[in-house]
Amino acid sequence: METTIYHKENLNDAAKILENGGVVAFPTETVYGLGAVATNEEAVKKVYEAKGRPSDNPLIVHVSSKEMLLPFISDLPEKGAKLIEAYWPGPLTIIFNIDNNSGLAPSVTAGLQTVAFRMPNHQVTLDLIDEVGLPLVGPSANTSGKPSPTLSKHVLHDLDGKINGILEGGSSHVGIESTVIDLSDYSNPVILRPGALTKLDIEKIIGTVELDQHLENQTLTPKSPGMKYKHYSPDAKVVIVEGDSSTWNEAVEFYHQQAQLVTLLASDILLSEINLENVYKTYSLSKNTDVTQAMTHLFSGLRELDSALVNREGIILVQGYPNYDNALGYMNRLFKASSQTIFGKTPN
Ligand code: TXA
Ligand code: MG
């Protein structure tokens, strides 16, 4: 199959492919998604197949308005209405109880009685959904287990020849996937996946919410099926480095001694302070100390450094943000990418 690149000028062509049961990746502010019409079972199955995604891991459904969501859910709880009002379009996925007669393709929910919805904040994709007139499923458009794509070239790298097309939309500025909140148990809202939108952002709107237990204690089983899989992993080994340039210099020396090609993913400030003599390649995570910028560049940095290390013994050292309130999403992805390896703190 040939994978066609579409631009906003020929959005109608991409929409036609989707209407005919094809699979087209689309841009969002978080990461690129892999689109198919959410009411077309055959099309949805192709999405699982292209990604190599386990069939027990349900998909997020993308809409272009609140009205488009309503027919698919049993009811809209008050807290859901408030969150939609405050944060849609935006990086927030909400899980509702499903309306069983809504016509959603069965594979979307992988047999659950709940369904995840989100309205992405990206005009090209909102226009695409409007043009199709139906909601689109949209798991991140990467091969299952790899870092999510924040550029169309990442999608092409993983899925060229396996999908019908990619709608070009520039780089995803948030950089990690949406925050997922489960509102299916009305009295007990739970954050299943942390993202750029924080617990505090949500609590400002609907009061107290809990974090799923596995986010507080990594040994417990997550409630969201997708969170249990190994994720976001480059082929090269990834290690988190916390601390200042002296810790980084120690880490570089340690892996250099083991004859590893050492690559670094850190802020410009840190990179300017580290001894780079034995460093093979660096990638700028951010221009400042802010974790928001680091979030934007985490996945592209992992992909870039991983490509530089293909077929070579190498390591990617990545900056940790251990004490930042708004870094939960960033650290969650980084823990998965590194299998929770922190230099000097866990076995290296
Ligand atoms: O930012 C995002 O959310 C991106 C963009 C493309 O919108 N999409 C995305 O989709 O990250 P995906 O499929 O890679 O992640 C969806 C997550 C998975 O962890 C999945 O298990 C969970 O949401 N999920 C979906 N439906 C669920 C449900 N009914 N109950 C619990 N978890 C659910
Ligand atoms: Mg994903």
Image: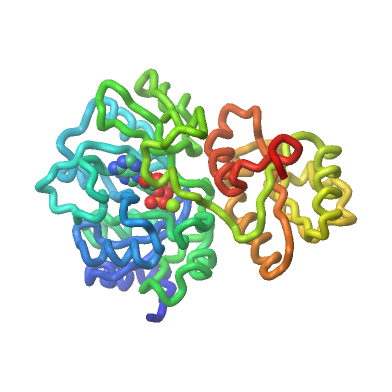
- Can residue 222 be seen in the rendering of this structure? yes
Q: Is residue 323 above or below residue 4?
A: above
Percent of width and height locating residue 301 = 64, 55
The quarter of the displayed image where residue 140 is located:
bottom left
Q: In screen coordinates, is 156 left or right of 95?
A: right
Residue in front for this viewpoint, 174 or 234: 234
Taking the spot 22% from the left edge, 48% from the top edge, the residue there is 111
Q: Quadrant of the C terminus?
A: top right
Taking the spot 44% from the left edge, 44% from the top edge, the residue there is 228
Residue at the far left in the pictured view: 101
Percent of width and height locating residue 61 = 29, 50
Total numbered labels placed on residues in the image: 0
Percent of width and height locating residue 3 = 41, 76
Residue in front for this viewpoint, 345 or 148: 345
Q: In screen coordinates, is 248 left or right of 74?
A: right
Q: Quadrant of the N terminus?
A: bottom left
Residue at the far bottom in the pictured view: 1
Taking the spot 13% from the left edge, 53% from the top edge, the residue there is 103
Taking the spot 68% from the left edge, 43% from the top edge, the residue there is 240
Residue in front for this viewpoint, 229 or 75: 229
- Can residue 62 be seen in the rendering of this structure? no
**Protein image colouring:** rainbow
Residue at the far front in the pictured view: 347
Q: In screen coordinates, is 195 left or right of 296?
A: left
Percent of width and height locating residue 120 = 38, 48
